[in-house]
Image (spheres, rainbow, N blue to C red):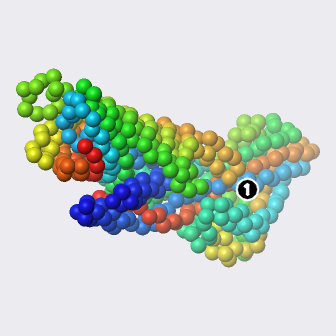
Amino acid sequence: MINGIRTLLAVLCFLAAAQAQVDELISRYAGENGDGFIEPLITGFGANLNSGLYRSAKIPVIGLHMTIGINAMAARFSDDQRKFTATTTGYFYPVQEVEAPTVIGDPKGASAISPEGTEYVFPGGYDMRSFMIGVPSFTIGSIFGTEATLRYFKARLNEEIGELSLFGIGARHSVSQYFPTLPIDIAAGIFYHKFKISEIVTSNVYCLHAEVGKSLAIMDVYGGLAYEANKAKVEYTFDSGVETADVSIDVTGKNKFRLTAGVGFNFTLFHINLDYNIGNQNVLNAGVSLGL
Amino acid sequence: MRKYISILLTSFLIVLSSCKDVEVYYPIPLQSQVPIIVTATGGTFNDSLQINTADISDDLVEKLYELGLTLDDVDKIVLEGAAYIVVESSESNVVMTDSINIRYGSSGYVNMMFLEQIEIDQIMNTPQTNVLSPEGVALFNTVLKDIKNNEAFPLVFIQSKGSLVPVSNQVIFKVLIDLTVTTVVKKIQTIFDPLG
């Protein structure tokens, strides 16, 4: 079974990295349109990372418990995320604004054509309706109703992409322990992720969350509210054939608030959960974990 | 234990069945420069040079090779834009009229760029981008199309023909024709799209 988990983890993490292979497409953009082109992927990625931070609102006040698990998160893109207003650059004349596909949009691309017949071509997207990543995690607690979670992954994928690394750390605290007569569990937490693809993409993702839930035999029902933010810096060298320029694009994800509703099942050492997150970017999350 | 393994295997199959191939079109813009040394004598000039289409093709193939692509991956090659830049002149206080013409295959010279009565001093080192003509762009795109299809004529001729005011014995200036040529390639990418 451990081999099975390893295989699943490796596949999910690799697929996440393969989707991030956008350097060829974004190299069309010397900066002015790059943020609009890549923004849906950054938003989807941040929204994914901020999912699966809990599978119950219940945290024991004291006693050792540890779980190791993996979450698969899939952000669902809306139609309005598939295009953005791009502007022609360079020697193309006259300057035109065009509805061009974002990185998840129409793979055929778009063009601006001048009265003289010159053509400025914008790259196509990957025609993605969703963006899925897999994230391994380790959780340990409890000290005074507090637990900590670590997420970590590092791999060298290939010469083109280079190294991919993810680091995440967070803590949750039981609020309901201070209200022993409450019929439900309440908890709150904070989480931080840092994600890097080689020296091209660096992303920082933050989340403040609060959740309520109820344990019913082997089943946990939970819901939550979160505030989140994510920023990414994309850096690469733009090569026009005559000259090169270092390009740095700051991209801010559009995800701010989210509502979560989910259900989990506990089978002694084995736990599964499924939740749906509604916000600027909707996310479906499924988790599998082992531990007490 | 069998139950857990079957859950994992099912998840694994769902993951694999969610992959799809997408043919993505994307541009590779490349800039090239054609320098022309113009010598005006008695107020007029007519200078020309020739470019080997094989050299253009070799540069393109080399660039595609660097990106792991071949000419078979090319959907089209088009002129994105061009600029006329005066970078050096022995006399800058002169008013210039210049017509950049191209000749290819059986065509005569066709105007590609036209600048009318512009003081060299005002445009020195400043790219002029609003000077293209539709006929010239169409002929240049024919050259690019023939290169893509491997059926290009060997040479493209470029001519700079015009006049200077006031007339003087000799004025020498250097013009750069900056061309941005975009090669649109198509590449199949395997995308994981579980909810697509």
Residue at 73% x, 39% y: name it.
B125
Q: Amino acid at mark 1?
A: Ile
Figure quadrant of residue B123:
top right
Q: Position of residue A7 (x, y in %)?
A: 40, 60
Q: Is residue A120 above or below residue B185?
A: above
Left or right: residue A164 versus residue A131 is right
Pick the residue in front: B54 or A194.
A194
Pick the residue in front: A75 or A151.
A151
Figure quadrant of residue A178:
top left
Q: Quadrant of the N terminus of chain B?
A: bottom left
How many marks overall?
1
Element at label 1: strand
| Whether residue A72 is visible | yes
Q: Position of residue A155 (x, y in %)?
A: 50, 50
The residue lying furthest to the top in this view is A178
Pick the residue in front: B7 or A95.
B7
Q: Chain of mark 1?
A: B
Left or right: residue A156 versus residue B173 is left
Q: Quadrant of the C terminus of chain B?
A: bottom left
Residue at 68% x, 66% y: name it.
B61
Pick the residue in front: A34 or B47.
A34
The residue lying furthest to the bottom in this view is B151
Left or right: residue A155 versus residue A82 is right
Q: Which residue is mark 1?
A: B100
Q: Position of residue A263 (x, y in %)?
A: 17, 47
Q: Is residue B52 above or below residue A34?
A: below
Instruction: Using a 10 Å C-alpha cutoff, classify the residue at mark 1 as few (fewer than 14 neighbours), some (14 to 19) or many (20 or more).
Output: many
